């Protein structure tokens, strides 16, 4: 059992480091420790953060995990109509890039009553282009 510990630990570390490279290099994500305890974030510090909305309301946050996919919660997207993803919404005065969602899916065993399996995935019709401002 002990002989499998170190190889498993090393493989886990390599997978974690490799998964941080799924995004475009221009996303400028830091793979180090992040502290967000009430401090103001820099404009380009969280380019992977997304806002999920329908035609009338902001619904939830999301995370860009690939140039065409945003991870969010199932309760945010189930039965919500046409969905949109907004990037670059640092404050109300700045330009925001909005993408329509071409496909939304959530865990087939999601339960609204218990909150179990509350995970959803949004596919965008176009690649996200990280410009340093979005």
Image (spheres, rainbow, N blue to C red):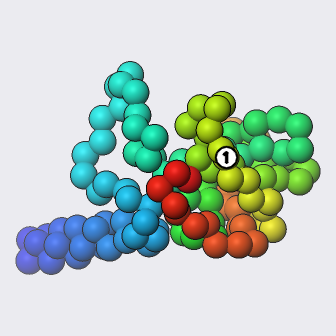
Question: Closest to the observer: 19 or 93?
Answer: 93
Give the number of marks. Answer: 1
x and y, in percent, of residue 112 in the image:
76, 41
User: Does 38 appear above or below 32?
Assistant: above
Question: Closest to the observer: 111 or 103?
Answer: 103
x and y, in percent, of residue 116 in the image:
64, 46
Question: Which quadrant of the figure has residue 27?
Answer: bottom left
Q: Residue furthest top?
A: 38
Q: Residue at x 17, y 73 (%)?
A: 10
Residue neighbourhood size for the residue with mark 1, other residues' Cα within 10 Å, grouped as few (<14), some (14–19), many (≥20): some
Q: Is residue 45 left or right of residue 49?
A: left
Q: Is residue 102 left or right of residue 124?
A: right
x and y, in percent, of residue 52 in the image:
71, 46
Q: Is residue 134 left or right of residue 92?
A: left
Q: Residue at x 62, y 59 (%)?
A: 70
Asked which secondary structure carries label 1, the reply is: loop
Question: Which quadrant of the figure has residue 60?
Answer: top right
Q: Is residue 62 visible?
A: no
Quarter of the image for the N terminus: give it: bottom left
Question: Closest to the observer: 81 or 39?
Answer: 39
Q: Residue at x 79, y 67 (%)?
A: 103
User: Does 63 appear above or below 103?
Assistant: above
Q: Is residue 14 visible?
A: yes
Q: Which residue in the protein does label 1 denote? A: 96
Q: Residue at x 89, y 54 (%)?
A: 82
x and y, in percent, of residue 11 in the image:
23, 76
């Amino acid at each position: 059992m002990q002989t499998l510990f170190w190889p498993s630990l090393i493989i886990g570390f390599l997978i974690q480091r490799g998964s941080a490279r799924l995004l475009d290099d221009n996303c400028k994500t830091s793979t180090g420790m992040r502290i967000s305890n009430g401090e103001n974030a820099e404009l380009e510090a969280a380019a992977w953060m997304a806002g999920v909305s329908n035609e009338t309301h902001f619904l939830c946050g999301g995370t860009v995990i690939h140039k065409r996919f945003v991870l969010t919660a199932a309760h945010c997207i189930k039965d919500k109509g046409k969905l949109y993803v907004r990037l670059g919404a640092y404050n109300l005065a700045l330009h925001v890039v909005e993408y329509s969602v071409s496909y939304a899916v959530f865990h087939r065993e999601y339960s609204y009553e218990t909150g179990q399996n509350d995970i959803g995935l949004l596919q965008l019709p176009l690649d996200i282009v990280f410009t340093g401002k979005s």
